[in-house]
Image: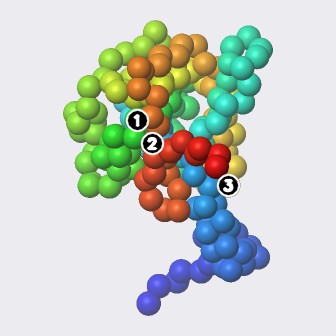
Amino acid sequence: MSNWNASSIWGEGMDQDLRNRFLEGMSRAATFVAVATTDGPGGRCGVTISSLTSVSADGDHPSLLACIHHMSPAATAILKNRSFCANLLHEGQQDLANLFAGRGGTDQAARFDHAAWDSGPLGQPRLAGATAIFECRLATAMLWETHHIMVGRVMAVRLSEDPKALLYGQRAYRKAVHLNGD
């Protein structure tokens, strides 16, 4: 028998029905899939994320926001290394998305053995075949309940010739299709 208690997981007063409806509602929003990677004194790590968005193209540098679970070794490493790459996955890279999401039981270091990588100007791991790569210096981070919200100043961008991004929505990988408007 477990001492599991919904309020200890979701906070005091969290309504289970509200949580379930929130999860269902958010599953209906298709988002692109990225692997956030980092290397440096805090270690070489990577994790699949679907909460990555632009903050601004203006200012000293463009900026983006990534949210990473506080228990992820990648979050700890990014906070120590103070830089990261957001590797926007190509629609053919769903195996890497699964791998860096921790499916398959491969440890952090071995995950990098399953693809070709090089280092960007900040020394961060850049994934071959990614549709876009944003190499960032960590500008600020805050812990919000279960996730670190990280804002990175984009220092370099690499674009592939094939812009077809991997999407995730309705609890499955997707690809974008053109709508004709008829």
Residue tagged 2: 166
Report the side of 103 relative to 14 (left or right).
Answer: left
Residue 148 got which mark? none
Give the residue type at disc 2.
Leu
Give the residue type at disc 3.
Glu
Task: Identify the residue at image location x=64%, y=36%.
Answer: 53
Q: Earlier in the sequence, mark 2 or mark 3?
A: 3
Residue 90 got which mark? 1
Task: Identify the residue at image location x=62%, y=55%.
Answer: 29
Residue 145 got which mark? 3
| Element carrying mark 2 | strand
CA distance for labels 2 and 1: 5 Å
Give the residue type at disc 1.
His
* Quadrant containing the N terminus in the rendered view: bottom left
Q: Earlier in the sequence, mark 2 or mark 1?
A: 1
Circle 3 packing at 10 Å, graded few (<14), some (14-19), many (20+), is few
List x then y, in percent, for residue 120. Answer: 42, 14
Give yes or no for contact between labels 1 and 3 (Cβ–Cβ under 8 Å). Answer: no
Give yes or no for contact between labels 2 and 1 (Cβ–Cβ under 8 Å). Answer: yes
Q: Is residue 5 visible?
A: yes
| Element carrying mark 3 | loop
List x then y, in percent, for residue 66. Answer: 60, 38
Q: Is residue 96 above or below residue 169?
A: above
CA distance for labels 1 and 3: 31 Å
Q: Is residue 64 above or below residue 159?
A: below
Quadrant in the rendering for residue 142: top right
- Tell us which disc is closer to us: 2 or 3: 2
